[in-house]
Structure formats: C-alpha cells, structure tokens
C-alpha cells in the first residue's frame, strides 16, 4: 500500500490528467490546444512556468506537428506525453500508425469529442474509434478518478519491454474533462516509484550506437513488422493485467481488462464505454431493485480487444446489449461486431443487440438506458437501435 | 579548420555508398557538403522523398549517424522532436555533449506540404538546421510541379501542350519567407561551390538557433539533363541568377561566391536562355510562340536579382 | 533478400547496423566506367567531393581509383575534372 494517504480533492478530469502528468514529470510534452482537452495543456503549462516539472514543453503549431514531435522525441530517448481531441486526433491521424510502427511508448490523453461535421464540441467516441486500427493501446475511463489512475498506469503498460507501443487514455469530453468530481490522488513519490525511470530502446540520442528509425519496407518486411505489432498488442493485455494488480496494491483501486458491475448472476448484460458506464450502473441498480437480473461491463482496455474476458462475461446470458457512442455509418457501432466475434467461441450465443446512443453529445440518461435494456428483455429491440434521438 | 578538400577528406563518412539514388543525383553531393559543416555528434532527420526512400531501404541503412524519418510534411517537427528531447535530457544532465540536428527535405516537403511544420519549428527557434534539397518538382513521385517549380517548366502535372507553356506562375520565394521568421541564419547554396556550401552549413550549425538553407539540387531525371551534368547545372543556376548565392545573418543580407562577383561586375550574368537551352524540361520554350514566356522568365529573374541586390545594400 | 527471422528483427523497423547499405552493390547499374589517367591527375580531389556515391577512393590525399562495386557510372567525375584526366568508357 501507499506510504502516505492523501486527502481527497475536487478536480475535473482534464485537471486530474495534468496533475498525474505533473507527478510523473515527463521529459518532453508537445501539444496543441483543442476543446475539451485544453485544460490539460493550460494546467501543464502553468506547472512548467512555475518550475514544478522539468519537462521541455513545446507549443507546436498543429496537432500533426504535436504527434510528430512527440514520436521523434520518444524515439530520441525522452519520456513524452501529449493530449488532443476530435479534430486534433483526426489531424494527427497520419502519424498515429507511424508512431505505433516506430514502437515508441508515447502517452496521449484524448478528451473524446464528436468528429466534424457538422462541427460539434460535445462528447461521443467518434474520435477514439477512428484511431482504433492504428496500433495504439486504448484505455477508457468512467469517471475522474479512473481518468487520473489511467494517466498513471498508461506509461507502465506502454513502456513495458514486451510492449513498447503508444497508448491513448480516453476521457469523455465535458462529462469528465470539465466536471468536477471527488478524487483520491496518489502521493507523488509513490507515483514516481510506480511509473519508474524511462528506459528507451535504441534511442537516437545514443549517437555512439547509431540507429536508423522510420525505414522503407517492402511487402515481406512490412508484413513481418506488422506482425511484431500484433504480438506486442497480445503482450499488452498480459502487461495491463499485471499493472492493474500492482496499482491495486498501491491504491486499493481495482481495474480489470473489462470492468464488471453485478454481472455474475445477471441474465442480461450491457456493454458500454466511458462515463456512461456509471449511468449504466445506476440503471442496473434500479432494474435489480425491480427484480430484473441485469449487469454492466466496460472494456477498460479497448485496444487490444480483451476478447476472452468479454466471452467469459457474456457466457450463458440470455441477451447482451452493446452500447456504442459512435456508429460506423452504413454498418454497426464499433463495439457490436467485436462482441459478436467474441461470442463465436461460446457453445450457445446470447442474443445480441446494438444500441447507438449519445451521438454528438446527445443526452444519456438512466431512462434512455433503462428503456433500451427493457426492449432487450422484451425481445422488441432491433438488431441495431438508435436511442436518445430527440428529433 | 582550414577548408580544403584534403582536410575534408579526413572527416568520417556519414552517408555511405549503396543508396538507391539515381546516377548523377545532386542530393547526396549536397548532403555530404552540409554534413561536413559539423564535427559534433549529429542526428539526421529526413522528410519523405527521394533522399529518404533511397537511403533507408530496410534492412539496410546508408547512414552512419542516427537517422529518423516519420512522414512527408513534418520533417521540421520530426527534427524539432529530437532536439526537444536533447534539450530536456541535456538540462537534466543526462547528455553532456553539444549536438547538432539537421533535417533534409525536398522542395515538395518544404515549399508545399511541410511549410506549416517548417514555419512552426523556425518560429519556436529549435536549435536545428533545415536543408531544402530543391530540385524544383516532386521527383520521387515522377516529376510533378511544386510551388518551387519555375514558370515554363514541363512537368507531368504542368505539361507543355498545344495550349500550355508548362507551369504557369513563378516559383515561391521560400528563402524570403524563412528570412521573415527572424531566425539567426538563412542561406542559399549550390553544390557546385562546395566551399561556400560547407562554410554556410557550418554557420547554420553554429548559429545557436534555427537555421534554414535552401539548396538548388539538380535532378537529371526531372530536368532532362545528362547525369554527368549535375554539377554544371548547379553552377549555371548561379551564373544565370536563377539561384543566387547569399546568406542572411541575423537579418543582414550578403551575397556570396559567384553571385557576389556578378553583383560586383567581376563575372557575367548569363541570360536565362542559357539555362533553358541546357535542359530538356524547357525544350518546348524554344518554339517561337513561347518567346513571351521566356521574356517573362528573364524579367522575373532580373527583378528578383535587383531586389536581392537592394536587400544586400550592395 | 537477406535471410532474417522475425524474432531477430529489432522492433520498430529499426536498423542497428550503420552504413549497411554498402551491401547493396549499385555498381551493377553502371553502363559507363570511369578511367583515370594518373599522368594528368593533379589530385585536386574534386572528383571525390562531387561523387554522389562515395565511389572515388582517396588514399593519403591521392586519387587511388574508383569503387567499382558502387560507382553508378554517372560521369560527374569526368565532367568536372579540371584536367580532363578521367574518361568514361563503355565497359
């Protein structure tokens, strides 16, 4: 357990991420302001201005340069953090797969926001989902506390010698980034000890051992390098579980590849990401009070996809409702087909329903989620359902 | 260091043989000269382009110094990232030595897609040298026009045709844009004058801030010249004042080498027709109907040259 | 292609063997071969400076010959030689 127990504080999600970063004190940070991530870079700039961190902070001219600079800095041998949201992440997109292919354990906070257009600053998961196939590990948070905790655990997962992959810590825009919640911080010495020293692999600044980074591959080498990334992703699941265990020892707070709420004896499961997991827990409690056996689960690690845990949780259930805060236009929400794929290993496949909700920041209330679950139980839900749409 | 070829020959080779650049390519010649400008430990960054793909074909590298490439439009940010890491680790005492950082990029990666990242890096003042290997078109993708391409040039996206004289409009004066960033060192170089290039590279590396060097870099394939003519073409660019050699140190302009001689009347300023007649990419301009285009080209070269002379208070 | 196993490949497509492209023998590309007349050569080293392929061999400040394994036969050395000591031959 931690040496020193700190007093709880009231802080918003962005502030909590910046606070964790201050405690970790990375070598380099480069970022570009974008709503609703801006508080992170503003808070962190203050820490730099007041000499509270040793970080080289670079105010870049765009997100493309932010991620480029960070990838290069990390390749050079510096622990490097950045943060963005929505259009910023979209603007970074070219560099997302390049960064992961270069195997740099960069940490990026993403304040999830709907992707234009039309332009919309509110929360959904369109930005994170568009980054889904780029080889980054992705963590989700359901409240301010887990946004902070993820920020501390992320470098441990990313920098593990068997992983060496960049990592995104998602937190829902406004709902978490701007909402003040009660949070228990970890003592700074404990954070530093938990995260440890950065040990780069073949850093550029080790000029006595010159390495070339960012090579040109033909098909055979490209395929092989991609397969190395697949292997590292597989390892990341094992490493994340280990880091969660160590974090529990330090703080008493428990996380899993897939966080579960009252799933064990449930007949119906809701799978949901981000802050809505909390709303779903309230929904579960109310339905349980009415005698309906419902449970909720949130993939805490979304990439790599924790398929075995998902399969275990939905095994033997009557039906599963998969909630997506994004939709692949013309297909399903992104979680749905992956949960279905996880279920193909089961002898008996539960009924599976996809609920698209909260798009562009549309309200996500207990009544909306409850209504969705009731339609699942009644069997009146469609394969794909658009809930909470007011017009 | 006395700059003689014999002394330069003693320096360690940073870019080796076995790269896949075309026979007669100007890029490795220019890069070699630039890299002779520093004896400090160095990290090289490359923007996507001929120079990058040809020197980094996995599992081989042509580089004896640390090398990084990420993408096309962000060479300046890539180099800045390595420099930022260096500044942080040096401040923490984890690195003791003084180091240098250089990015090489083509004109497409500099004048066009990489202009924003370049502007940002120069404005922030990273301690780095950015070198544009300007061969006046997108050569890696097969000779498409860029904003560095001059009027009248036949490229695959500005082809000379029955109603077109090739590229319309003049090339962008990127060097002037870099001067406008108020950085300590900006220069134009040509590989034919190795002494001028090595000295300018040294100034760029030693200036203590962001430096920019724009280098005319002949491309036999794209310019439709014989591979053996690369150095001659670079020289001709200077002699015609298509590519004046000058430097801007802390905002102060000065002509150098052959360009200084031309301004002093000690050397002839050759006509643009010498330039046009030497290269296949201007072959169509010999047609009588494009005479007005050639006149405009000459007038543009003259006005740019006169402006430069005014700036140097010559 | 060199025989390489995935597990032996450093992660991130990094190449940890500096200058390894020497293994690529670009001399195969050559149509014309430089020949130096050492009687005419003044060892000014211009050919060395302007060779795009590091293929002019200098020993103790003197032009020794050409690295035929890598010389692509561009002919720049012959073109810029102030004494016309180098000729390109079909070979």
Image (cartoon, rainbow, N blue to C red):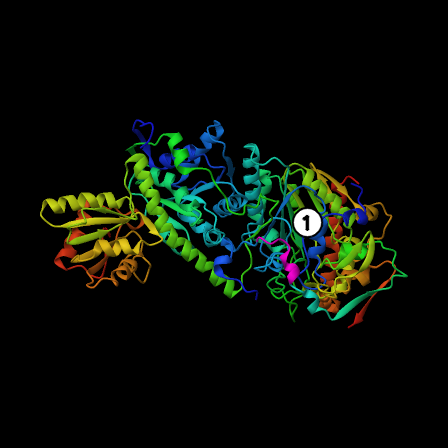
Residue B9 sits above or below residue C73 on the image: above
- Left-right relation of A18 to B281: left
Q: Chain of mark 1?
A: B
User: Residue B98 occupies which quadrant of the picture?
Assistant: top right
Residue B196 sits above or below residue C26 on the image: above
Residue A154: x percent and y percent? Answer: 39, 43
Q: Quadrant of the C terminus of chain B?
A: top right
- Left-right relation of A370 to A189: left
User: Residue A192 occupies which quadrant of the picture?
Assistant: top left
> Residue drawn 78% across and 40% down?
B1
Q: Which residue is mark 1?
A: B214
Residue A69: x percent and y percent? Answer: 52, 45
Residue B282: x percent and y percent? Answer: 72, 65
Q: Secondary structure at mark 1?
A: strand
Q: Is residue C61 magenta?
A: no
Q: Residue furthest bottom?
A: C90
Q: Is residue A130 visible?
A: no
């Amino acid at each position: 357990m931690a040496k020193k127990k700190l007093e709880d504080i009231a802080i918003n999600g962005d502030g909590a991420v910046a606070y964790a970063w201050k405690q970790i004190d990375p070598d380099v940070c480069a970022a570009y302001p974008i709503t609703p991530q801006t508080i992170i870079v503003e808070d962190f700039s203050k820490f730099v201005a007041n000499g509270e961190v040793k970080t080289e902070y670079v105010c870049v001219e765009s997100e493309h340069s932010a991620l480029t600079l960070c990838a290069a800095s990390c390749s050079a041998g510096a622990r490097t953090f950045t943060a963005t949201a929505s259009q910023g992440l979209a603007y970074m997109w070219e560099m997302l797969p390049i960064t992961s292919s270069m195997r740099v354990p960069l940490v990026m906070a993403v304040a999830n926001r709907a992707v234009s257009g039309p332009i919309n600053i509110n929360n959904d998961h369109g930005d994170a989902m568009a980054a889904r196939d780029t080889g980054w590990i992705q963590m989700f948070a359901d409240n301010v506390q887990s946004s902070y905790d993820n920020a501390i655990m992320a470098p441990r997962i990313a920098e593990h010698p068997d992983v060496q992959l960049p990592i995104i810590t998602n937190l829902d825009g406004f709902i978490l980034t701007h909402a003040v919640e009660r949070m228990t911080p970890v003592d700074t010495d404990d954070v530093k000890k938990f995260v440890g020293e950065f040990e780069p692999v073949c850093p550029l600044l080790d000029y006595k051992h010159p390495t070339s980074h960012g090579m040109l591959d033909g098909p055979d080498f490209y395929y092989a390098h991609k397969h190395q990334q697949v292997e590292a992703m597989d390892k990341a699941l094992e490493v994340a579980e280990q880091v969660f265990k160590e974090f529990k020892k330090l703080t008493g707070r428990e996380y899993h590849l897939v966080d579960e709420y009252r799933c064990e004896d449930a007949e119906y499961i809701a799978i949901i990401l981000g802050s809505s997991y909390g709303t779903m827990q309230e929904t579960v409690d109310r339905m349980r009070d009415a005698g309906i056996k419902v449970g909720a689960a949130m993939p805490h690690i979304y990439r790599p996809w924790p398929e075995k845990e998902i399969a275990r949780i939905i095994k033997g259930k009557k039906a599963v409702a998969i909630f997506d805060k994004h939709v692949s236009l013309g297909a399903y929400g992104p979680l749905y087909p992956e949960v279905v794929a996880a279920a193909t290993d089961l002898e008996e496949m539960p009924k599976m329903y996809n609920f698209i909700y909260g798009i562009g920041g549309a309200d996500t209330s207990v009544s909306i989620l409850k209504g969705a679950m009731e339609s699942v139980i009644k069997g009146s839900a469609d394969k794909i359902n658009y809930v909470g749409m007011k017009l | 260091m006395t700059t003689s070829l014999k002394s330069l020959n003693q320096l360690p080779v940073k870019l080796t043989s076995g790269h896949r650049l075309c026979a007669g390519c100007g890029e490795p010649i220019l890069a070699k000269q630039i890299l002779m400008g520093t004896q400090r430990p160095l990290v090289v960054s490359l923007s996507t382009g001929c120079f990058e793909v040809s020197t980094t074909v996995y599992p081989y590298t042509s580089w004896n110094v640390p090398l990084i490439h990420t993408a096309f439009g962000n060479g300046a940010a890539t180099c800045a990232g390595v420099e930022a890491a260096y500044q942080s680790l040096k401040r923490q005492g984890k690195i003791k030595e003084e180091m240098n950082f250089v990015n090489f990029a083509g004109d497409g990666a500099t004048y066009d897609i990489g202009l924003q990242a370049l502007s940002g890096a120069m404005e922030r003042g990273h301690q780095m040298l950015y070198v544009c290997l300007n061969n006046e078109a997108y050569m890696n993708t097969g000779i498409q026009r860029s904003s560095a391409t001059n009027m009248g040039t036949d490229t695959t996206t500005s082809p000379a045709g029955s109603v077109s004289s090739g590229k319309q409009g003049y090339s962008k004066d990127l060097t002037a844009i870099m001067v406008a960033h108020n950085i300590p060192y900006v220069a134009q170089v040509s590989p034919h004058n190795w002494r001028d290039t090595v000295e300018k590279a040294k100034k760029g590396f030693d200036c203590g801030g962001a430096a920019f060097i724009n280098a005319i870099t002949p491309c036999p394939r794209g310019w439709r010249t014989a591979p053996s003519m690369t150095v001659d073409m670079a020289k001709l660019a200077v002699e015609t004042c298509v590519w004046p050699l000058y430097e801007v140190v802390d905002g102060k302009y000065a002509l150098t080498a052959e360009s200084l001689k031309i301004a002093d009347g000690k050397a002839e300023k050759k006509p643009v027709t010498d330039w046009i007649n030497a290269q296949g990419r201007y072959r169509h301009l010999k047609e009588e109907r494009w005479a007005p285009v050639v006149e405009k080209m000459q007038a543009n070269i003259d006005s740019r040259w006169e402006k430069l002379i005014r700036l140097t208070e010559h | 292609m060199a025989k390489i196993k995935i597990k032996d490949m450093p992660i991130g497509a990094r190449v940890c063997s500096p200058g390894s492209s020497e293994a690529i023998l670009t001399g195969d590309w050559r149509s014309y071969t430089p020949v130096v007349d050492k009687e005419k050569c003044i060892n000014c080293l211009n050919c060395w400076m302007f060779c795009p392929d590091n293929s002019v061999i200098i020993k103790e400040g003197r032009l020794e010959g050409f690295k035929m394994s890598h010389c692509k036969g561009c002919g720049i050395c012959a073109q810029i030689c102030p004494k016309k000591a180098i000729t390109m031959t079909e070979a």
